[in-house]
């Protein structure tokens, strides 16, 4: 009887944490994050899937884009039909949105065509710098308006950031909202307007990216069946939560999100930083805390 209970418990545990159920859990929380920020869902999906399911990044990128595409489409529908009218009929906003979509598509095509020629490590280093700068800017550590130091108008700013976002999408499995939401806020849009405009561009760009991955045979149809429903269910939770905070608080949270994301990318590409983090955790886990350990952490940090 004891063996039967042990066997049954083990089987139930294996079922609860099978790859299928892990994907459903990841999809739900990634979509909730996407619904809240209008961005970062693909990054979260990508990282957690690589860590929890131990999958290769190239295998995960396409599924991340597909999952968050569903979340973005759901979020757009919810935000359009909210009682508060987010975007009024304004040709300036429409033109900026068209520029964003066009440059985002060009970026995806460029990133996919030159995926094997571009050095991924160098691109990741560039994106780490961009994310850190924008993150600290949103938190107020760098004075002035977000783009006041650059002599570019709203049209050029939109084109440049949309192109960068499009390139990052197929190469790193990142959603374009990580770049576009702060860009739209920086050129004068409210967080609600910036999120919705970013979502529209994101949907088109990510669908194109997912289709390219599917065409290349790097998007598993079986995995797609596991993630679509949690993605649709998780999104409204995130959208609802985003309307419970003030725009200033949202901007600070988004800045923190970008810094955390940049730190994770840097951790992935820097073996020295990984050794440093592991050394710090090992020292902190030990029972003794002497001056020699503090010195050791200091010298390890200098080695980085």
Image (cartoon, rainbow, N blue to C red):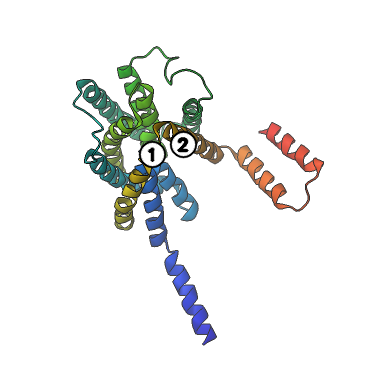
Q: Quadrant of residue 18?
A: bottom left
Q: Is residue 51 visible?
A: yes
Number of on-image labels: 2
Question: SS at mark 2?
Answer: helix
Position of residue 199 in the picture relative to residue 4 (left or right): left
Q: Residue at x 31, y 46 (%)?
A: 71
N-terminal of the pair, mark 2 or mark 1, is: 1
Identify the residue position indicated by label 2 in the image: 253
Q: Is residue 218 visible?
A: no
Picture coordinates of residue 47 (x, y %)?
46, 46
Residue sitting at the far top: 151
Q: Residues within 10 Å of mark 1 (few under 14, many from 20)?
A: many
How far apart are the alpha carbons under marks 2 and 1? 9 Å
- Do the residues under discs 2 and 1 have CB atoms within 8 angstroms? yes
Position of the C terminus by quadrant: top right
Residue sitting at the far right: 291
Position of residue 21 in the picture relative to residue 271 (left or right): left
Q: Residue at x 36, y 31 (%)?
A: 181
Picture coordinates of residue 130 (x, y %)?
47, 27
Q: Is residue 92 above or below residue 15?
A: above
Question: SS at mark 1?
Answer: helix
Q: Is residue 95 above or below residue 279?
A: above
The image's mark for residue 27 is none
Identify the residue position indicated by label 1 in the image: 37
Of residues 173 and 297, the one nearer the viewer is 297
Picture coordinates of residue 203 (x, y %)?
27, 38
Q: Quadrant of residue 36?
A: top left
Of residues 43 and 187, the one nearer the viewer is 187
Q: Residue at x 46, y 68 (%)?
A: 14
Q: Residues within 10 Å of mark 2 (few under 14, many from 20)?
A: some
């Amino acid at each position: 009887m004891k063996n039967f209970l042990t066997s049954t418990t083990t089987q139930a545990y294996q079922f609860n944490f099978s790859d299928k159920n892990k994907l459903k859990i990841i999809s739900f929380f990634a979509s909730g994050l996407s619904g809240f920020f209008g961005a970062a869902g693909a990054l979260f999906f990508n990282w957690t899937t690589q860590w929890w399911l131990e999958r290769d990044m190239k295998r995960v990128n396409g599924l991340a884009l597909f999952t968050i595409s569903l979340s973005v489409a759901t979020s757009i529908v919810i935000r359009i039909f909210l009682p508060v009218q987010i975007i009024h009929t304004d040709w300036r906003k429409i033109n900026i949105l068209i520029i964003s979509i066009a440059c985002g598509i060009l970026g995806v095509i460029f990133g996919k065509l030159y995926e094997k020629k571009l050095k991924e490590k160098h691109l990741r280093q560039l994106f780490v710098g961009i994310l850190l700068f924008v993150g600290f800017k949103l938190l107020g550590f760098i004075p002035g308006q977000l783009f006041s130091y650059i002599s570019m108008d709203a049209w050029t700013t939109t084109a440049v950031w949309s192109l960068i976002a499009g390139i990052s999408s197929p190469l790193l499995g990142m959603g374009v909202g990580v770049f576009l939401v702060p860009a739209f806020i920086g050129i004068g849009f409210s967080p609600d307007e910036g999120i919705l405009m970013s979502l529209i561009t994101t949907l088109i760009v990510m669908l194109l990216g997912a289709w390219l991955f599917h065409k290349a045979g790097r998007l598993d149809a079986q995995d797609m069946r596991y993630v679509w429903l949690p993605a649709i269910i998780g999104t409204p939770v995130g959208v609802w939560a985003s309307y419970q905070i003030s725009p200033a608080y949202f901007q600070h949270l988004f800045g923190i999100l970008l810094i955390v994301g940049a730190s994770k990318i840097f951790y992935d590409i820097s073996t020295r930083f990984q050794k440093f983090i592991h050394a710090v955790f090992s020292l902190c886990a030990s029972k003794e805390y002497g001056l020699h350990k503090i010195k050791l952490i200091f010298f390890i940090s200098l080695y980085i």
